Image (tube, helix red, strand yellow):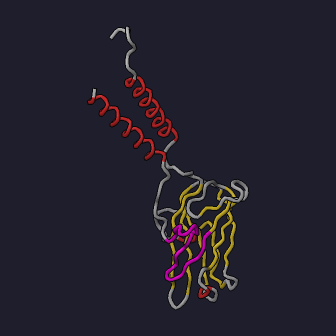
Amino acid sequence: MMFLQFIRAGLVYLILSVGLFSFSTQIQAHGGLSLADDLCKLTIGPYTMHFTGYQPDSSQEKEFCEDIPSTGRTVVALDYIEEALRPLPTEVRVIKDTGSEENLDGITVLHLPSKVYSNGSINFEHNFSKPGKFVGLVTVIGEEEHVSRFPFAVGEGESNMPSGLVFAIAAAIGAGAIFLLKVGKKPKDGAAA
């Protein structure tokens, strides 16, 4: 009896672990982009900018700072944190993530040429018509050139798992739970063993 309880507890632990792991949000390093003190900060050499993205047509006021939840019109604001950035020329580029950046012009989907943003804010809008993987490049030119490179996905949701795999895992968890409930029931008095 003690052995059966041990096996049952082990199966419950295994099923819960697999379920939680499978449905957890994917965590990846996103280059110079990080979430600190509820602010999305973009690091460019010794400088930092506050990064905020919106999709006003699909997610209203919901902000994002890494992956873009869906395709469509996307508005991005980069706000300087250090005053020292205001007199420095800054360039912004969004490219398709092809694994190579040799033909930069050929893979560019958005380009804001280098200029001084003395108001301390860079705002732009782009319509991502297809889901995919992209790379943001922000270049600041001071005494030396600093580039922040941050990969991101568009329209790929919170999980990269195919929906069939998600269904199979959910079905396995459900079957395991039913099995554990049936194994855990004791036969009633007078029932045939």
Residue 141: name its quadrant. bottom right
91 or 66: nearer the viewer:
66
Residue 140: name its quadrant. bottom right
Whether residue 108 sits left or right of residue 178 in the image: it is right
Q: Residue furthest bottom?
A: 143
Q: Residue furthest left?
A: 3
Residue at 29%, 28% in the rendered image:
4
Residue 165, image x and y in percent? Answer: 47, 39
Residue 57, image x and y in percent? Answer: 73, 56
Q: Is residue 142 above or below residue 39?
A: below
Magenta stretch: give its range: 32-51
Residue 35, image x and y in percent? Answer: 53, 67
Whether residue 179 sits left or right of residue 138 in the image: it is left
45 or 92: nearer the viewer:
45
Q: Could you tell me which quadrant the N terminus lies in?
A: top left
69 or 104: nearer the viewer:
69
Quick check: is 36 in the magenta stretch?
yes
Q: Could you tell me which quadrant the C terminus lies in?
A: top left
Residue at 51%, 82% in the rendered image:
146
Residue 75, image x and y in percent? Answer: 68, 65
Q: Is residue 138 above or below residue 56?
A: below
